[in-house]
Image (tube, rainbow, N blue to C red):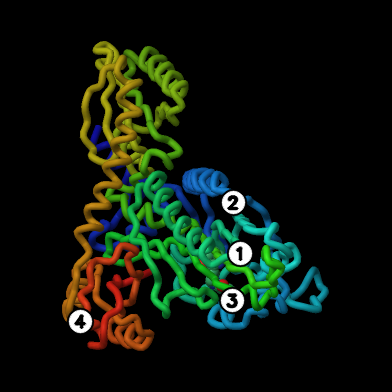
Amino acid sequence: MAQDSKKQDKKANLGLTVTKEENFSEWFTQLIQKSELMDYSPVSGCYILRPRSYFIWETIKEYFDKKIKADGVENCYFPMFIPESLLTKEEEHVEGFAPEVAWVETGGSTKLKERLAIRPTSETIMYDAYSKWIRSHNDLPLRLNQWCNIVRWEFKHCTPFIRLREFLWQEGHTVFATREEAVDEARKIVDFYIDTFKEVLAVPLLTGQKSDKEKFAGADFTYSIEGFMPDGKALQAGTSHYLGQNFAKAFDIKFKDKNEQVTYVHQNSWGISIRSIGAMIMLHSDDKGLVLPPRVAKNQIVIVPLLFKHAKEEVLAAATKLQAELKEMSLRVHLDAREQYSPGYKYNEWELKGTPIRLELGPRDLENKHVMLSRRDDGEKRAVSMADLNTILPLELEQMHERLYNKAKDHLDNSIVKCTSREEIVKAVAEKKIALIPWCGSNDSEIQFKDETGIQSLNAPFNQPDLEAETKCVLTGEKAVRWHRFGKSY
Ligand code: 87F
């Protein structure tokens, strides 16, 4: 049987032909296509999200949406076309991004009087409206979010989920009377992201403040969440910006405070995208294929009946009954009763697709009133009595989530190295680690070091280790002002 399934596999070119270790990027591209998460479209950099990956996004969306709504944020939708005059109103922040903007210049065969940008982000169109809506302190805070698609015409090499020309995200745009309220919210959103990545995707994060060079140009400061990938690179998976009064001044967003004084508002913006899915896939998956944390698995359990001629009807009937019972418990269960494929072939296929739990059921199992259970993350097979399934299955799914998170967290914690010289940083990063260094924070030192080594700043941890007063910056020898993480980044 094993021999057979290998043959069938080969024919269909079902499995992965490279390992995660030997060629990470090829492994990733094969994995997401062969597991039917995504497919290519006719336009380069634009990808199709198939139901299995759209389900993941829906789960993230549902979880985060609930959190922000409970906190007072409201959802809305702004148009995707932004007049050129509006987009360029706050010059400073678009400058660096201008080459990535995609434009609509004609409608049918008529040339438009003013070009329309396809939204690359919605600050400008939203703040134009905010300036009309906000008059007094009674209008504040205003806290809106939208779930939408955006377009950035990337010229670098595109990678599905990671760097794309069109992608799905949420963007929160909030307005406050005081700096303090805004800063508190910017930090709180990071906590919401940490929680979402942990509870939904089992992904631990490095969170903290971006350097001046890496922050959003339109912001006073930027907090980021960064995943740590198995190839040793960090993956920025979201940002939360305190915009200060920069956009308020450009878009004239003012309000009368309680003392009848007219002042500019304080603003934040924050976002996560389907990049989060890319991070989750890279982190947990293996040489056999996808490993999905159970909460985002469209199929959490697959039942594979062993359909031998003599007991086919009984086994199939029992499998169907089992599926119905598990569905009753709100588990997402698929019954794979296809007769043209061997069980071995099916095992490989469901492993490739990342299904958390497989239950095998044959005539012998039926007699013994048990099923054979194997979990995708550890691969061990054991017999579980039918009567115990209703308690065991939810437990196994919980444990799998915990195990994936803890494994990734241990790896992350063991990959941070305090460095006190340039050589140590280079060595640590070459060993697929992240360097934590005393730093002066200057732009020049970061630019020069990145030019020389390809290593950049990631973020400065919120919880700073002690920094003795005399500590020197590892890059410049000047006085260090904080500990900052450095590494390779996507
Ligand atoms: C591309 C073209 C034009 C990024 C762009 O991070 C403008 C931009 O402003 C641009 N690419 N950005 C920065 C986006 C900032 C901010 N927006 C809301 C976020 C989170 C969500």
Which numbered circle lies on residue 177?
1
Residue ID for mark 3: 246
Cα distance between the residues tagged 1 and 3? 14 Å
Cα distance between the residues tagged 2 and 3? 22 Å
Mark 2 or mark 3: which comes first in sequence?
Answer: 2
Residue at disc 4, secondary structure = loop
Cα distance between the residues tagged 1 and 4? 39 Å
Mark 1 or mark 4: which comes first in sequence?
Answer: 1
Residue ID for mark 2: 73
Residue positioned most to the front: 259
Question: Relative to 441, is 53 above or below?
Answer: above
In the image, taking residue 276 as reference, residue 104 lies left or right, namely right
Do labels 1 and 4 touch, CB within 8 Å?
A: no
Cα distance between the residues tagged 2 and 4? 44 Å
Mark 2 or mark 4: which comes first in sequence?
Answer: 2
Give how far across and how far down residue 369 sits, in percent.
28, 13
Mark 2: which amino acid? Val
Q: Is residue 45 visible?
A: no
